[in-house]
Amino acid sequence: MEKKIVVGIGEILWDLLPEGKQLGGAPANFAWHAQQLGARGAAVSAVGNDKEGDEILKIIQERNLTNGISRVDKPTGTVDVKLVDGVPDYLINENVAWDFIVLNDAAKEAIVSADAICFGSLAQRSEVSSKTIQHALEMAPEKCIKVFDINLRQSFYSRQIIESSLEHATVFKINDEELDELRKLFNMSGDDVSVCRQFLEEYNLRLVALTKGSNGSALITREEMSEMETPKVEVSDTIGAGDSFTAALTIGLLANKSLKEIHRSAIEISAFVCTRAGAMPVIPEELVSGIGK
């Protein structure tokens, strides 16, 4: 059977951690996990004409992802991670390559035949990348599942960007902290599920996914709801866990699985990613088998 084409579009960068740098950026994480789960993954972003950009492109090639990453005359994105009394403090640097995403030929080819495309709000902090992302969503086929994985960071979002993204979206993924922020931004009241239902109705979404860390998660559609507890695991770090959840959710929807089946796979895979260091561990076969079939 021909593989589904699944695209992640947005930021790609280096997290500059005290112990060294690590590849970051939700869209590439998402594309990698979707590919492990049986799709053809494409990463769409931009890097600079520098050593850091070369290193990112090498990883994308090694992971055998479709390279929708253009090179622009800006430095490759970085995030400074400082430890303050042992607690990480992040500074996402501005005016970097992924603020100037343009679609190369490989990106365009992947987008016009995409079965699913995942995007967030962070890469829309700049006008150039925001326009590119909105254009990509309009280029995608009508049947394409468009997943808005919101990803609120620092002050890099606005109600206008969020509304515009929701109008394009089929699926909305949000965590409990982000939901609290949106309650204020959209002047909404009610418990978590009722606020999710308001978004579902207001923006004609197919599904809202709410993750609450160790407090469980919920998948909400017009017809049904699945609530599940988070599996208890020994956490190495949580980097990339949310992206793997989104990837498993997307692959499950493409395979027309039941809501419960989709949810079970998503929590098991994201729990596994928490047990490994970094955003892109290899997912074991027993978790992969069956999800996209």
Image (cartoon, grey):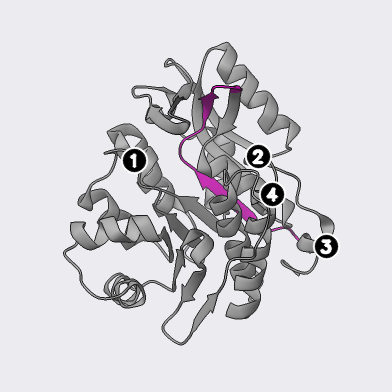
Q: Which residues are magenta?
A: 2-20
> How far apart in space, not on screen, are marks 2 and 3 (Cα)?
25 Å
Residue 207 is at least partly visible in this image: yes
Give the mark nearer the N terminus: 2 vs 3.
2
Q: Which residue is mark 2?
A: 66
Q: Secondary structure at mark 2?
A: strand
> How far apart in space, not on screen, are marks 1 and 3 (Cα)?
36 Å
Position above or below: 180 against 152: below
| The disc label shown at residue 286, or none | 3
> How far apart in space, not on screen, are marks 2 and 1 (Cα)?
22 Å
Q: Secondary structure at mark 3?
A: helix
Q: Secondary structure at mark 4?
A: loop
> How far apart in space, not on screen, are marks 4 and 2 (Cα)?
27 Å
Task: Specify the amino acid type for callout 1.
Answer: Gln
* Magenta span contains residue 6: yes
* Pointers 2 and 1 in contact (C-beta within 8 Å): no
Which marked residue is nearer to the observer: mark 2 or mark 1? 1
- Disc 4 crowd rating (10 Å Cα; few below 14, some 14-19, many 20+) is some
| The disc label shown at residue 275, or none | 4
> How far apart in space, not on screen, are marks 3 and 4 (Cα)?
16 Å
Position above or below: 67 against 150: above
* Magenta span contains residue 176: no
Side of 155 where 205 appears, left or right: right
Tell me the quarter of the picture where residue 58 sits: top right
Give the mark nearer the N terminus: 1 vs 3.
1
Which marked residue is nearer to the observer: mark 2 or mark 3? 3
> How far apart in space, not on screen, are marks 4 and 1 (Cα)?
31 Å
| The disc label shown at residue 124, or none | 1
* Pointers 3 and 4 in contact (C-beta within 8 Å): no
